Image (spheres, rainbow, N blue to C red):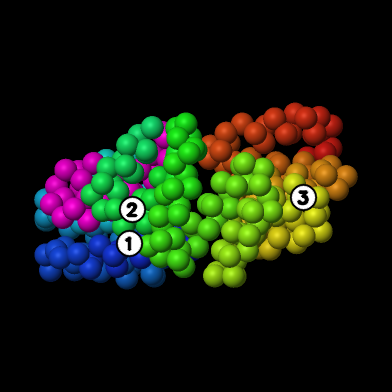
Amino acid sequence: MKQYILVVISIFVSISSIAQSNTARYYQEKASKLINNQEYEKAFITLSNGINLMPDSAYLYETRGTLLDVFSRYQEAIQDYNIGISKAKNPKLKSHMLSNRGGVKQKIRNFNGAYEDLILSIQLDSTNINALNNLATVCREVDKKREVVKYLEKIISIDSGYVPAYVNLGFEYQVRNKHKKAIKYFNTAIELSPEEPLGYSNRSFSKLKLHDLYGAINDINRSIKLFSSNSYAYKIRALIEIENGNRKKGCKDLKTALKLGYKQQYGEEVDTLISENCMNPSDSN
């Protein structure tokens, strides 16, 4: 949860840098302080009061939409982004909201809708790194896999220190079974940000594929310590444990992955792994 809250606050800051009314800025800054104090309901009420007072403020719809997104109220978030986008006159703000709406659609697995939003976003602002990064991940889902590396390399040309681009480039080469090359990108991500959990979890999977089980288990345990609610990491650890002959531990991790929402985020793979490896009820206890 803390990682998501940091995302919200950073968005407040970026939006505040765009010219807007002092009144809208007041409500955004007040909401940001409430979020810092973990008073999320009050923050939502504050933004809603601002919208009632200024129903044409695209900035407030954007900010409230982001807060709704953080708490998985995705359809409500999309509604706020829809209104904000229709009212936005600043191209960078509109690009930002299209990127965020595309990110929400990606979470609910509406990949075609996400792709359309993200393409529009970079057409308005070709330097929108978040949009480029999300677009690269969505391309894998809409049969545009050849475009993935192009968008990620574009990010690095804009900002060579942007860690998610290296993680996603590593993942792209991982998907292509080029695990040694993938590990080089994960290494760069970890060098730039030693506390980056996805760098460790993805590197763990590539090490597993290269039969470095000791390195794989060390990386995945580090990742889970940094990001304990990441369902994908538990699936990876399950694969390592099963490969190591620790089927019971593996099945327990698969069960944890399901509890953390793996199916909703990534599909049916964990169910398949359970049916293949955990037919004995005691395996997942």
* 2 or 1: mark nearer the eye: 1
Report the Cα–Cα distance between label 3 and label 1: 39 Å
Per the image, label 2 sits on a secondary structure element best described as helix
- 92 or 174: which is nearer to us? 174
Instruction: Check disc 3: other Cα within 10 Å, few if <14, some if 14-19, many if 20+.
Output: few
Name which quarter of the figure residue 47 lies in: bottom left
Callout 1 amino acid: Ile
Instruction: Give me the residue at 59% from left, 59% from top.
Output: 185
- 283 or 221: which is nearer to us? 221
Upstream in sequence: badge 2 or badge 3? 2
Callout 3 amino acid: Leu
Asked whether residue 48 appears in the rendered view, the answer is no
Report the Cα–Cα distance between label 2 and label 1: 8 Å
Which residue is identified by label 3? 210
* 2 or 3: mark nearer the eye: 3
Position of 218 relative to 80 (above/below):
below
**Residue 148 rendering spot, x and y as whole percentages:** 47, 44
**Residue 264 rendering spot, x and y as whole percentages:** 53, 37
Q: Is residue 189 magenta?
A: no
Per the image, label 3 sits on a secondary structure element best described as loop
Instruction: Give me the residue at 11% from left, 56% from top.
Output: 53
Circles 2 and 1: CB distance less than 8 Å?
yes
Asked whether residue 95 appears in the rendered view, the answer is yes
**Residue 261 rendering spot, x and y as whole percentages:** 57, 42
In the shown orientation, is residue 85 left or right of residue 150? left
Position of 139 relative to 42 (above/below):
above
Which residue is identified by label 1? 11
Q: Is residue 107 magenta?
A: yes
Q: Main secondary structure of the magenta part?
A: helix
Instruction: Check disc 2: other Cα within 10 Å, few if <14, some if 14-19, many if 20+.
Output: many
In the shown orientation, is residue 149 left or right of residue 243? left
Q: Which residues are magenta?
A: 82-111
